[in-house]
Amino acid sequence: MHPDKRLSVWRREGERFNQDCVQEVLAYGGGSLMVWGGFSANHKTPLYHIQGNLTGARYRDEILGPIVIPFLQQLGPQATLQDDNATPHRARVVGAFLQQQGVHRMEWPACSPDLNPIENVWDHLDRQLRDNHPPPNTLQDLLAYLQHEWQNLDQQLLRRHVQSMRRRCNECLARRGAHTHY
């Protein structure tokens, strides 16, 4: 069994549809759900549900202005925003807005999700969803489960991820940009 609870099955030729090699999956009808969340060593933002396509203007108006700027102000003048190179995050309107707000932004290398601690948090949330909830029947169920698990995230876990940033960056430099073990 994989750490994410998926099962692998080895089967011989001709066994493809043998009932011993098939696992039924209850689907909730498909679709996708996009959420945004932020955290620091001592705090986390609310989990924000993004409906539709996220553009730079929407990122600025729905997430940065009402959530991120107050969060960074609460953290103090030394706070640094770490996002990634997602297209909405790097839009000109976003860069101009952050500069106008005096936000210090961490430089981010291309194609480096292993450096971003939020990826580890998303993985943790996925495992918590699988362990603590039945398969969702609807996207609304999934969103409710996600919000519940986000709310109950252990702040110690988040703190460890924040504190790992120096090690992540040093390992990336030592490996000359190759993937890290994170």
Image (cartoon, helix red, strand yellow):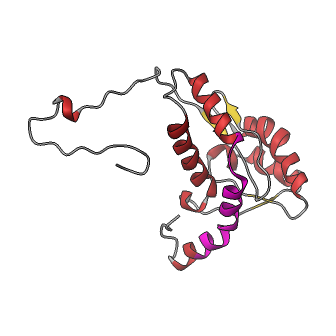
Using the rendered view, name the quadrant where residue 115 is placed.
bottom right
State the image quarter where residue 117 is shown.
Answer: bottom right
Camera-nearest residue between 156 and 110: 156
From the top left corner, tell me how far across and down residue 176 is, in percent: 51, 76
Residue furthest toward the left? 14
Is residue 164 shown in magenta?
A: yes
Q: Which residues are magenta?
A: 151-170
Q: Residue at x 9, y 40 (%)?
A: 13
Query: In this image, 94 relative to 131: left or right?
Result: right
- Classified by dominant secondary structure, the portion drawn in magenta counts as helix
Q: Could you tell whether 174 is left or right of 23 in the image?
A: right
Q: Is residue 120 above or below residue 47?
A: below
Q: As drawn, which residue projects farthest toward the front?
A: 132
Please identify the residue farthest to the bottom as the structure is shown.
174
Residue name at image x 49 percent, y 67 percent? 181
Eyeballing the image, is 132 above or below 40? above
Q: Is residue 81 above or below residue 32?
A: below
- Using the image as rendered, state which of residue 115 and residue 52 is in the foreground: 115
Question: x, y percentage for residue 16?
Answer: 16, 34
Q: Residue at x 61, y 58 (%)?
A: 116
Residue 131 vs 1, above or below: the answer is above
Q: How many numbered marks, from 0 up?
A: 0
Residue 69: percent from the left, percent from the top? Answer: 85, 47
